[in-house]
Image (cartoon, rainbow, N blue to C red):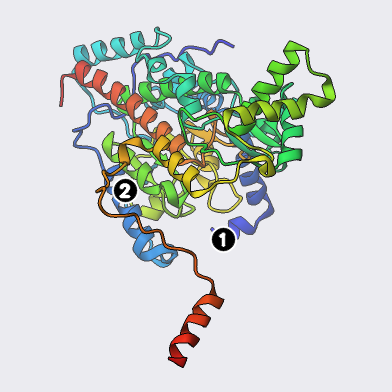
Amino acid sequence: MVQEDLEAGGLLRRLRWVWISLSLSPEYRATGLLKSGAMKPQDKPLWYNVYEAFPPKYEPCFDRPAPEVKIRKIFYPEDVIRAKFYKRYGSYGTAQLSDQKPRPTVCQLFVKEYEHLQAKGSVPEDQLMQEAALALEAQGIYLDRSRAPVKTESSLEQEDEQQHPEQQLTTIPNIKQVKLEKLSIAEIFKQSQGNESN
Amino acid sequence: MRLPQPVNNTVPGPAMPFSPTTTLNMATLGKKLFILSVRMGRGLWHRGIVSSSNPVQSAVEPLEKLQESSSDAITEQMAKSLKYPDFFKVAELFTVEDLFNARVHLGHREGSLNDHMSQFIFGSRLSHLIFDLDQTATLLREALNFTAHIAFRGGIILFVGRIPQHQVMIENTAKECGEYAHTRYWQGGVLTNSTIQFGSVIRLPDLIIFLHTMNNVIYEHTAIRDAAKMLIPTVGIVDTNCNPNLITYPVPGNDDSAASISLFCNLFKAAILRGKEKRKELLGVH
């Protein structure tokens, strides 16, 4: 067996068989075998009739050439607005790709406002970005963080109440809400020094 | 291109599951493969080769002679089933939206694109390739139809996939539809040298379904080439970095997401079960 392999004729014969077996479709070879009598009719492969009735769209040959198809780049008209948005404000927030019905992202809302203003035509081109950002501020999304209202404790509570009205626990009116003040390290140091001296 | 009709119209192949002449069939073969690949690994090559006194053949075993009347009726029915474009209604199993939700349209990046796959690509979004799901849907319907017909004729179907994340999913799919799976290390001679490797007459699978055409590394699975050599038709999910040329019924799509692989597994399982159901009706045998 090894000797046969080393023989040039044997190797070439095998290579030729491999080339034929891969460059011709299985059905072509099976037909050939059946016609020549090498494969008896009762040995006809199970898939032969099915393949005959439903041949594949592309014949399975090893040397089937790759059709020269240029891959088109997918771009939309809104991409110009998106590019401007991301350049100015970076990646704002996150999006879950696995969500089936996701909420619109900040970028999507921005694009919507921008296009709305563009369609109206009342705002000149160079101010469209600013106007769109202002429109989002009206909805509560502050792209320019410095313009965002400062969150004080009372406003935080108000926000909590607005967002989670059902989670508000009933407070007992007698007990005063003791608010812990932020102590600085210097004050703690002073206090401990005072204690030591006493 | 019309092919010449074979002289004898009988459908060969072991149609009877209870044929007493069935030798080492794929069930025990599958078990053996699993045990050998898990316990012995590559040490199999050093096992003593068992030689049988009878001349060995790894082709499909000839059908046991049935009663003439029943076999004619069966073959007639099988020939009739080929006249319908979608006998098993596999087109109802999925929609393009299902493919989209399972993320089948997501390909790799332009750098790893195989030139043969460029015809199945819709476009590239910032160098991320997107499959054309209309083409995928057409080819998937073809593949499912073929699978169902093979199952209808009592063919042995082998699921192959070599990515560890989806191994268990593929094996479970095969179990649930009563077919076979090989998701472990593929020893070279499984198809081409089966009689010597397993030491007995082997019935090879009639269809191989590849959930992954690539191995762990950047090479194609050996079984693709070997199935082409042994005249076994193949169905395969081909990603943007795969070569679809040797696969009989390629299905361009994403083979890396668990969602897409699970969708494909379910679709193939459904097609096989439909084929088997019709077969049960036809044969009236459990």
Q: Is residue B23 left or right of residue A178?
A: left
For the point 48% across and 21% down, the residue is: B97
Q: Residue B9 in the image: x percent, y percent? A: 37, 13
Q: Residue B85 in the image: x percent, y percent? A: 43, 9
For the point 32% across and 14% down, the residue is: B78
Image quadrant occupied by the C terminus of chain A: bottom left
State the CA–CA distance, disc 1 to disc 2: 28 Å
- Crowd around label 1: few <14 · some 14–19 · many ≥20 (10 Å): few
- Whether marks 1 and 2 lie on the same chain: no
Q: Is residue B11 above or below residue B203?
A: above
Name the subunit of mark 1. A
- Would you name the residue on which mark 1 appears? A2
* Helix, strand or loop for disc 1: helix
- Residue extending furthest toward the bottom: A197
Q: Nearer the viewer, residue A136 or B52?
A: A136
Q: Hey, what amino acid is under mark 1? A: Val
Q: Nearer the viewer, residue A7 or B205?
A: B205
Q: Is residue A48 left or right of residue B218?
A: left
Name the subunit of mark 2. B
Q: Residue B257 in the image: x percent, y percent? A: 49, 40
- Look at discs 1 and 2 and give the one toward the viewer: 2
Q: Hey, what amino acid is under mark 2? A: Leu
- Would you name the residue on which mark 2 appears? B29
